Image: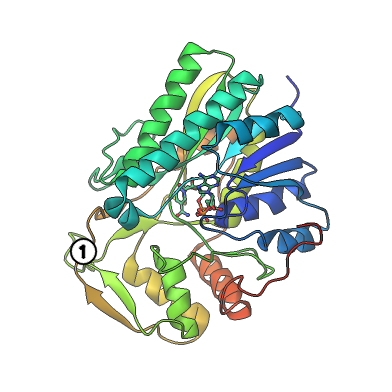
Amino acid sequence: MSPPSTLLLTGGAGFIGSHACVELLDHGYELIVVDNYSNSTPHVFARVERIAGRFVGAVYELDIRDRRALSAVFDRHSVDAVVHFAAHKAVSASTRMPIEYYDTNIGGTTSLLRAMHEHGVHQLVFSSTASVYGDAGHGPLNEATPARPANPYAASKWLCEQILADACHRHPEFTVLALRYFNPVGAHPSGLLGEDPSGTPDNLMPCLAQVAIGRRHRLRVFGNDYATPDGTAIRDYIHVMDAVDAHRVALDHLADSPGMHTYNLGLGKGRSVLEVVSAFSAASGAPVPYDIAPRRPGDVPEQVADASAVERAWGWRPTRGLADMCVDAWRFQQLNPHGYAGTARRADG
Ligand code: NAD
């Protein structure tokens, strides 16, 4: 089977999706993007096009749970493969709004799978997450580590993985590569694309950047009484440019063998919250002020990837470290103190 050339990207206006658009346009892919802009803006496409020097392609504003609208997109375009980013992703919001999270993340995935199957499209790269491992204790987590999702967001992604595995089992024409990201952060080196969450950010790096630029007074560090060396939670981080590079490489491997294959994407190195605060302070040239707050429900003490499986399978590994992640995130924040607000729309948008 020849490698895919026309891709449908769900959630392509989001943080990771927009960086993926650049990466995939740079590598000659034709793109069809669908997004409901529930956590993004169509303005991002003008920037994607500026970097890539090409039109993004067909862009549709739709909710992927709307099966009729999604099916019409497949009717209209000859899609070779799908990269499925669209989802709600905030752990703390998922504990407050579990039904919304299950509906969007699981309902969106089943709607997409049905549309794909009905249109003879069977190659999918799926955005999964390290949170499926939950509180699995100390030490690197490999793909065989039993899942113990600790919040509705993680449970929704774990259920999606089960649904995808069942679909592959029942319909052997499906190939699914599920990539479990360990905290993608950073930004495109141009400073034109980055993470611009609506409302209060749930994740550490955008919070740090917003405090450093003066949009927020102080960072809240959730918990300093974990059983870790400095008491703060430990995570593995991956630069968003490495994460999207892994997607490009994944597309080359969709035809390797049918069925579902799952890979961790991380550096394989754990960093505490205070280590990241210190690395960001070094990147921004000033200490980021913080307060210690109580632990958040649904958070776990430590998650570090065993990132060796993807290297064995594809000879791929991330190349950027924590300092690059902080420097690039800070550049985006400096150049865009209010995120994408005020950005011009693309000419035909
Ligand atoms: P994001 O919120 O920036 O992007 C998600 C995009 O999906 C947004 O543009 C949003 O508007 C869109 N979307 C949401 N629901 C939709 C729906 N029903 N129909 C159409 N579009 C919809 O998030 P991101 O950080 O780019 O994450 C992308 C994927 O990666 C998600 O599936 C997320 O679960 C996964 N992931 C992210 C992280 C992270 O830390 N950023 C970590 C692990 C996994």
Number of numbered discs overlaid on the protein picture:
1
The residue depicted at 59 percent of the width and 20 percent of the height is: 117
Q: Can residue 80 be seen in this view?
A: no
The residue depicted at 39 percent of the width and 66 percent of the height is: 204
Q: Is residue 53 visible?
A: yes
Q: In which quarter of the image is residue 90?
A: bottom left
- Name the one closer to the observer, 339 or 290: 339
| Amino acid marked by disc 1 | Arg
Task: Classify 283 as above or below 84.
Answer: below
Residue 292 position within the rendered picture, expressed as x and y whole percent measured from the top left? 23, 75
**Residue hosting label 1:** 295
Classify mark 1 as within 8 Å of ligand 1 or not, answering yes or no: no
Helix, strand or loop under label 1: loop
Q: Quadrant of residue 205?
A: bottom left
Check disc 1: other Cα within 10 Å, few if <14, some if 14-19, many if 20+: some
Quadrant for the C terminus, please. bottom right
298 on left or right of 344: left
Q: Quadrant of residue 330?
A: bottom right
Task: Classify 120 as above or below 50.
Answer: above
Residue 308 position within the rendered picture, expressed as x and y whole percent measured from the top left? 46, 39
Task: Classify 269 as above or below 310.
Answer: below
Residue 282 position within the rendered picture, expressed as x and y whole percent measured from the top left? 47, 80
The residue depicted at 30 percent of the width and 46 percent of the height is: 98
92 on left or right of 256: left
The residue depicted at 22 percent of the width and 61 percent of the height is: 228
